[in-house]
Structures are given as structure tokens and as C-alpha cells.
Image (spheres, rainbow, N blue to C red):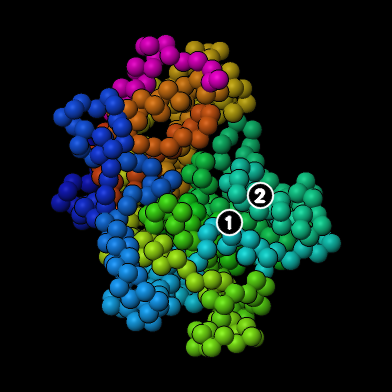
Amino acid sequence: MSAFKLSPASDPLRKFRSEFVIPTNRQMKASSVPDSLQDEECTYLCGNSLGAMAKRSKALVMEELDVWGSRAVEGHFDHPHGRDWMHIADHVHPYFAEIVGAKESEVACMGTLTANLHLMMNTFYKPTPDRFKILCEAKAFPSDQYAFASQVTAHGFTPQDAVIELSPRPGEFTLREEDILAAITEQGQSIALVLFSGVQYYTGQWFPMEKITKAAQIQGAMCGWDLAHAAGNVPLSLHDWNVDFAVWCTYKYLNAGPGGIGGLFVHDKWSSQPIRAAGWWGHDPQTRFAMPSRFSAIPGAQGFQQSNPSVLATVSLLGPLQLFHEAGGMIPLRERSLKLTGYLEELLHKSQWWITPEWAGEIQLREDRGEEHGEFGFTIITPRDPGSRGAQLSLVFIPLGGRTMPRVLRLLEGQGVVGDSRKPDVIRLAPMPLYNTFEDVERAAKVLEEVLTEVKTSGDIKRAE
């Protein structure tokens, strides 16, 4: 009996599965699933890329469409469901505060992740001739890398000189805490901003956020976080950790839907910070519609709001945030997440195609290692320590160079197991505690075993075009 798997009787959060719409095998075009199972739900382990739709999101969006049709412009002030559009984001702020560990005044529901990142960097990245560098991880999400490069360029620096990218040690996949802290100490007097992702999108590593924040600030640098893969995934305490600012999207673990509205955090120690990109929605709501010519900012994060938020996108987010709250917040969800991901890892380690991490560490140095030694299978590059990861496990398939992973991904999809890939060799699987089950985990592991056996016996392993 697994130490991770919960029985239905000891799994009270299991009931939230019914609050979500999980696509069927037929809808996901799972061609290898028998006809008798085509209308069964697929095994959806892709919430790290796009969360499943909450039924409540659909209901709330339909209500707002009806209000738009029946009340038109008056919906801004006179709303039949008590969600007048002028204050629609205020319904989200208490839930955001719970999710990221903040005061309501420290969070804002607005914009999109990268737009919010630029807003924050416009305010908090203040380079000088001596202190102008940005410290980040080498494989940050590309949008972050683009933002860093454009920001330093706008201040007259070159990315080559101003952006410090930390890489794992040779043969390793994740950054060591001591290496991050050492880099901050060694180069701290030249660093203006430390900005990492809370959870690394490729490896699934959860960085030691409190320690990094403290180390950066000791050196006199600002510290911000991209929480795209952390918000709704791991417990956060941004206020208590003294984080300067953070940004996040909501369509992954927060289940707000494709292109969902974003969020940001600004610590209340900066509540009087001048707003450098002011917009009318950040103006004091008491006089906003009086249209004064002089800006009067809402204190704190909400003063950064620029335009009225999309009502449909906001209520699409509101639905799942209500479910997070009803589930008891991030602590019980994290406990269930640890069980689900731990169970998946346990089952994967039992696979005949599992390759030990000690050997797999070498594959980063030589792409032909698997082919040369006749190795076939997969390993996990996400940290083994549950405290250093979220829900996601990142699997690397060997032989490398796109010879194995694309075929495995297609066969998994054909069997109705939905993960996502990062070319050329990684498939990411993320059991979500609000809607995935232990049966989902079992089926994913079982199908992966069958798929790898099929790939190996068919000899369908070739270099990608």
C-alpha cells in the first residue's frame, strides 16, 4: 500500500473534481481509446499549462453576458448580482491575498503577466552606473528574458553586461540554493534587481524564495518574482517574506481560462511609491468618475491599475478562486498536492524504463549518451525533495535530441493522457489537487509504461526533423 495514496474516505478534497469540466477522450481526439471509453473523461495532467474549466466560471460568465444584455452601461453601477463592474476586481482581491500570502491592499487583479512585469520593472528597476545588473536564472521563461533585455537596453546598458544568468552546475538540471546565494553575495554591490520565477517552468524547481529575497535585500538590491507557475501551486507568504513585488498569470494553476487576467503584488512598505505609468483605474475610486485632471493614486498595489479590467475575464477567474477558498486555501491543497505528485513519482520509479538520476545527470553534457550506450527510457529532472518542487514532474526521454519524446507524447495523447511537452525531450505532468484524482495518476503511469514498451519494441526512435 502506498504511503501517498488516499482512500476516498480520507480524501475530502476529492469532491471538488465535480466542480470542473474535464474533456472526454472523444473531445481530445484520443484515437487509441476504445469506443466504449470515448465519452469518459481523459486523464488531464496539463494544468501547469492551462487549468481545467471550472463550471462556476462558465456560470458567472453567462450571468455577466446576461447583465450586459439587460443592463448595458448601467451594469457598472447597478448590478442584479451585486457585482457592479466598477468594483469587479475588488471581488478578486481578497482571494488573491489568500493565495499569495498578502494584504488585500498589496494585490491587484489587472493586466497580463508580462505587461505587469514591465510595470513593476519600470518602478523598481532603478539602475545606476555602479548598480545596474539583473540576476535571474539562465533558463527563465523567454518572455521574462525579453523583458529583462528590453529594460536594461532602455536604460542604456547591454544585456550581455547587465543581465546575469545563473546556470546549473555541469551535469545537473536545477540550481543549487548555495550557488544562488553565493552569486548574490559575490556580485551584490552591482545588482539592482534579483528576479527569479517562483517555480521554474521547465524543471518544476521551487526556489527558496524567502532566503533569496533576504539575501538580495541585504546587498541593497530589489527582489521580485514571476509567480506564473507558483500562484495556486505552492503556499506563498509574500508579505511576511518581505518580497518587494511579484507578478503572475491565472490561466495555469488558478484555472481562469486561456489568456486570463493577471495579478501583481507590491509590498505595503512601498505603498507610497510614485506610480510611473498612471492610468485612470488606479485613481481614487471616490473621484474617478469626476474625471479630475490630476492623478490621485489608490495607495498600494491597486494604484498601478491602468484601465478597467475585462469583466468576463475577471469573473472567469473569480469562479475557481471561490473554489480555492472553499477547499480551505493553499495549506490543505498543498497537502493533497504532495500526495498526488509523490504517488506519481513512486509509480514512475517502478517503471522498467526508469533511468536513475545519477546516470541521467550526464545526458546534459553529451546528447548522444543514450544512443551510444543503448539506453532507453526516462528520468525526472524535477527535484526529489518535495519542499523544492510544486505539483509538476518534468520527465526527460532518452535517447535525446527529439528521438524519443515526440513519439511518446503522440501515443500518450492517443490514449487520452494529456500532458505537455518542451522540445526536444521533456514532457511535463502536473496532478492538480483541486480536480485530479489518484486514479488519474495511476492511469498516467500505466499508459506511459505501455507507450514506452511500444516505442521500444517498434524501434520507432529517430532523430527529429
Q: Is residue 179 visible?
A: no
Give neighbour class at mark 1: few <14, some 14-19, many 20+ (Cα, 10 Å).
some
Q: Specify start and end residues of the magenta stretch as a single range.
A: 445-465
Q: Nearer the viewer, residue 68 or 260?
A: 68
**Residue lying at 41% horizontally and 47% vertically, measured from the top left:** 50
Q: Quadrant of residue 328?
A: bottom left
**Residue lying at 76% horizontally and 58% vertically, measured from the top left:** 154
Q: Position of residue 60 (x, y in %)?
A: 30, 64
The label on residue 8 is none
The label on residue 146 is 2
Q: Amino acid at mark 1?
A: Thr
Q: Amino acid at mark 2?
A: Tyr
> In what quadrant of the picture does the N terminus appear?
top left
| Residue 225 among magenta residues | no
Give the structural element (helix, strand or loop) at label 2. Answer: helix
Q: Nearer the viewer, residue 338 or 92?
A: 92
